[in-house]
Amino acid sequence: MNLQNVYAERLQDLKKLVDPIESRYKDEEARLQAARNLSNLIKECQRATLPASERETVLAECATYDRWLREKIQVQDSQPKNIDRRSTRSTHDE
């Protein structure tokens, strides 16, 4: 085996280790940003000037989505950092 082949083999081994970590990091960043965006939208809706007839409905929906978001964040935060979080996405439609 020549040096170039050894180097290429080691590089592949390192990529096998690093790629999943990088993927989890990117997924985590995207998830946090999406949660911030939804939280900001909920706050905007809660502060919106609405007719009294619509206000209670909107506030109830905001509370429902806020609860859902907090539950999903809690589930994600309770999981070990070394698992593939994409495997837990099946519960996103609940």
Image (spheres, rainbow, N blue to C red):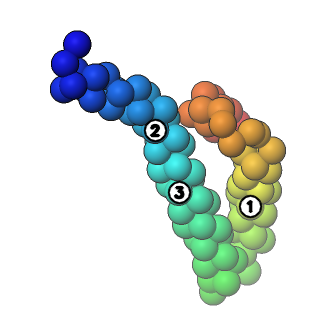
Which is more N-terminal, label 1 or label 2? 2
Which residue is label 3 attached to? 29
Image quadrant occupied by the C terminus: top right
Which residue is label 1 attached to? 66
Q: Name the residue at the front extreme.
A: 2
Q: Secondary structure at mark 2?
A: helix
Which residue is label 2 attached to? 18
- Look at label 2 and name its amino acid: Val
Q: Are marks 2 and 3 in contact (CB under 8 Å)?
A: no
Task: Using the numbered discs, state the Cα–Cα distance from disc 3 to disc 1 in whole angstroms.
Answer: 20 Å
- Look at label 3 and name its amino acid: Glu
Q: Nearer the viewer, mark 2 or mark 3?
A: 2
Task: Using the numbered discs, state the Cα–Cα distance from disc 2 to disc 3 in whole angstroms.
Answer: 17 Å
Q: Which of the 4 image quadrants contains residue 6? A: top left
Residue ID at (27%, 29%):
7
**70 displayed left or right of 33:** right
